[in-house]
Image: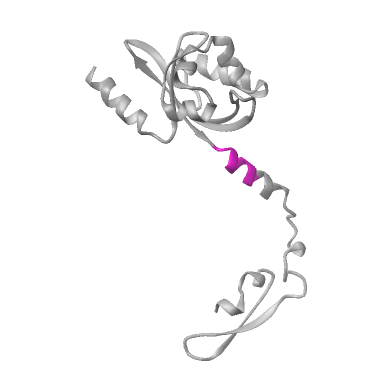
Amino acid sequence: EEGEKKFRALAEGSLQGIALSQGSPPRFVYCNSAMASMTGYTVEEMLSLTPQQIAAFVHHDEREAFFKRYADRAKGLPVESRYEFRAIRKDGSVRWFEIFATLTEYQGQPAVQGVFADVTDRKAIQQALAEKPKSSETLPGASGGATGRCRSGTRRSKAWSGPMSWIIKPKNL
């Protein structure tokens, strides 16, 4: 009981979503307020979700792999502990979650503990970077080799040039 009190104090103060699931098919037996906020549900709604509603919480493209990992982990089989998946919030919006999952015990029974982070913004940045042109010819100053001069501590001028010289702004030197 003392251990559970400590767990709850730590979990409720966490900025990351924390959920405990038991059974097959899984049911939430605990979730913190951060998890509820991430999903758009209240804690009470999360705890009352049916296994079918929990399944619908995981995007259909990742659902099979997600629940296979859950089942294997619940059996004690070695499973990747960190992965990303798309979740469907209560309002129907899709968010990317990163999960760190582990097998634990809750109220004397095996449980899967998941610690969740919303990584939607990170995924959007990665996507934007992946779509940027990769050719150095598209970078400012890359063609023709920009050059310039700046002062060093010895009052002598030093030249700067090259394909990435656009990063150096003479007014900042």
| For residue 97, above or below residue 21 | below
In the picture, the quarter occupied by the N terminus is: top left
Residue 43 in which image quadrant: top left
Nearer to me, 31 or 109: 31
Expressed as whole percent of the image width and height from the top left, the position of residue 119 reads 55, 38
User: Is residue 1 toward the left or the right of residue 25 in the image?
Assistant: left
Q: Is residue 123 magenta?
A: yes
| For residue 91, above or below residue 148 | above
| For residue 52, above or below residue 150 | above
Task: Characterize the magenta stretch by its predominant secondary structure.
Answer: helix
In the picture, the quarter occupied by the C terminus is: bottom right
Residue 118 in view (yes/no) = yes
Nearer to me, 6 or 84: 6
Expressed as whole percent of the image width and height from the top left, the position of residue 12 reads 36, 29
Expressed as whole percent of the image width and height from the top left, the position of residue 37 reads 49, 29
Residue 81 in view (yes/no) = no
Instruction: Give the residue drawn at x 67%, y 23%.
Output: 61
Expressed as whole percent of the image width and height from the top left, the position of residue 163 reads 69, 70
Nearer to me, 84 or 58: 58
Question: Which colour style is shown?
Answer: one colour
Q: Which residues are magenta?
A: 119-126
Instruction: Give the residue drawn at x 41%, y 25%.
Output: 32
Which residue ends up furthest to the left in the rendered image? Answer: 2
Instruction: Give the residue drawn at x 54%, y 26%.
Output: 40
User: Is residue 61 toward the left or the right of residue 155 in the image?
Assistant: right
User: Is residue 61 toward the left or the right of residue 153 in the image?
Assistant: right
Q: Is residue 26 magenta?
A: no
Total residue callouts: 0
